[in-house]
Amino acid sequence: MLYLYTLSAFVAVIVLIFAAPLRWKSRVSLALTGAGAAVGSTLAVKTLLTGQTTHLWTLFGTPFGIDTGSMDPLSALFVVIISIGSIAATLYSRGYLAHYLEKKSPAHISLHYVSLTIMSLAMMAVVISDGGFSFLFFWELMTIASFILILFDAERREVQRAAMSYLIMMHIGFVLLVIGFARLETLTGSASFEALAHYFGQVESLPLFLVFLLGFGMKAGLFPLHVWLPEAHPAAPSHVSALMSGVMIKTGVYGILRVTAAVPEGQMLQNVGLIILLGGIVTGLWGVILAAAQNDIKRLLAYSSIENIGVILLGLGVAVLGKASGNEAMAAAGVVGTLLHTANHSFFKSLLFFGAGNVLSKTHTTSLDSLGGLGRHMPMTALLFLVGTVAICALPPLNGFVSELLIYLGMLKGIASGSNTLSSVAALSSLALIGGIVIIACTKLYGIVFLGSPRTHEVAEASEVDNTRIAAMVLPLAGILFVGLFPNVAIALIARAAGFFLGGDALQPIAQLIPTFTSVSRAAWVLVAIIALMAWVRHRLMKNRTVTTGPTWGCGFTATNVRMQYTGESFSEGLQSIARPLTHNFGTGESIGKGEIFPREHKFHIHHRDRIGRLLSAWWVGSLHVINSRVMRLRTGKINHYILFALAFLALVFVLSLFNKL
């Protein structure tokens, strides 16, 4: 019955969007997505407030036996995250795709909005599916829809390559998940997440845990399975990048959380905690170092997503180690920090990708070396982007500071207890290093794009985007401000969702941390009040004065030009010694010749490619070339050979049928 309803909804979405007039397709998609988000969020908020689990469906006769769906506080939290991100992305798409309406066919636009709507609804279905069959069904539906969304500009070769890389990597992960659920069903008779606890209690759990970790880690962007992410996000439209980076990769985090919570206490849980912690450290450091080296806005933000997945897993590793050692305060701070940072990353990363889309649509480039001075021409985008960069740097009084402070407190609890000193110190040092490099990367990003002087006439002639896109950016902005200014309320809601991991209400062990966040909230409001007071005083002082503008003082040098500004490469030059072993660097352009006494203008761009990405892509591209070369040998051009191949196939079918193999 569930799949009949799903098919009916699928057909309804296709008919309504394809039948709608061209300029109404975005509104129909927004209405459908909003309806699903409203129903899901209403139930989710009720679940978070009451802490009760709501049963949604039961299916019989699936390949994995009985299949169920329900919403508990953890599912509810992810439904809220998905709902906010989906509505914001769909609303943003209306303005972003406006200039494509005359370039793309109505069928192309319709297919895009169908995929966008189905992807949003499929993500919500993923996190409320308990059984393996329905989970995998909606997981694959989400993957196919996102693949089509990436292919929006399919005429570009790099988009085709990124989409195929994404599809191949996702199906490798899908196969791993099928293996994991099939193994679970074989030994327990059920492929539900509830059966994991029984399996882990009876059988050596590490092999199956690793299978699930790799399968879900492929979607989340866990190192070294992250290679699709820096290619897919720049290739996709900006609202799709925001949805994939801010929301979709969190479904991988959701799966890791479910599987980890089922591991029983003991030595195995300690080993799992160390594996997750190590994975988080490596993923976070790799992502942030590569992010700081990038000279493209969307690639930098994509690597930043990998870094934040590392921070999320780092917090989860702290929580698991705390649970394994019986340190309730460490476990509670770690898991609540993990869940809160999952929501926080969705907010500020969606905001930043929307900002990148604004820049791209007005300047037709995302190259840092072609931008500059946009703060004057796009003031609202610059202000909102500034809020996003401050939040992602975990600076007060915004949301990133709250979640990372929780993770830090979990580490400090581990150090103080003496039971996880070494691992906690390693995690704390890694997170501090990640935080420092994030500030370098985001200062580079914001400073080069929005400050200084325009480098091209497209940038100099840029203007602010439409109000629809600004309104879409306000949605994640509200989440950023809410968590940053009311951390106690946010932590209380998140703590209810953490009960899946702690085995009860997480508010009790975290109650001792509430005074800390009460002080954080007060300090945040004081900071906001000081900023508002300074702005008011400045306004009063400047009200009756004449303001003139002039060139920036250049220490007596009057021939300054835009070539003297920092480029993306020169800004992060100090990090190149660290990033060089991790990247494959190559340049495009013509260097200055030895005979040029008075050099003419030259343009030279340096690109930093992930070595892991090149390694994996070279492997599967090489394999495809080998397969293709072998298959091409069969194309002899002789009709008698083709008839022989057909007869051989029929003979094979006949032989297999004799042995009941077909």
Image: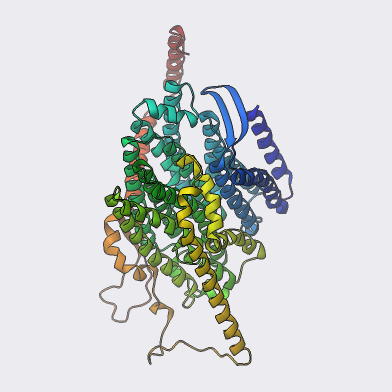
Query: In the figure, is residue 184 to the left or right of 124?
Result: left
Relative depth, front residue between 132 and 642: 132
Query: In the figure, is residue 294 to the left or right of 107?
Result: left
Quarter of the image with the N terminus in it: top right
Q: Is residue 313 visible?
A: no
- Residue at horizontal 68 percent and vertical 40 percent from the top: 13
Which x, y percent locates residue 652?
Answer: 43, 14
Classify 6 as above or below 24.
Answer: above
Query: In the figure, is residue 409 to the left or right of 476?
Result: left
Which x, y percent locates residue 529?
Answer: 56, 75
Relative depth, front residue between 658 and 314: 314
Which x, y percent locates residue 21?
Answer: 74, 50
Q: How many marks?
A: 0
Classify 26 as above or below 257.
Answer: below
Classify 79 as above or below 451.
Answer: above
Which image quadrant for residue 7? Answer: top right
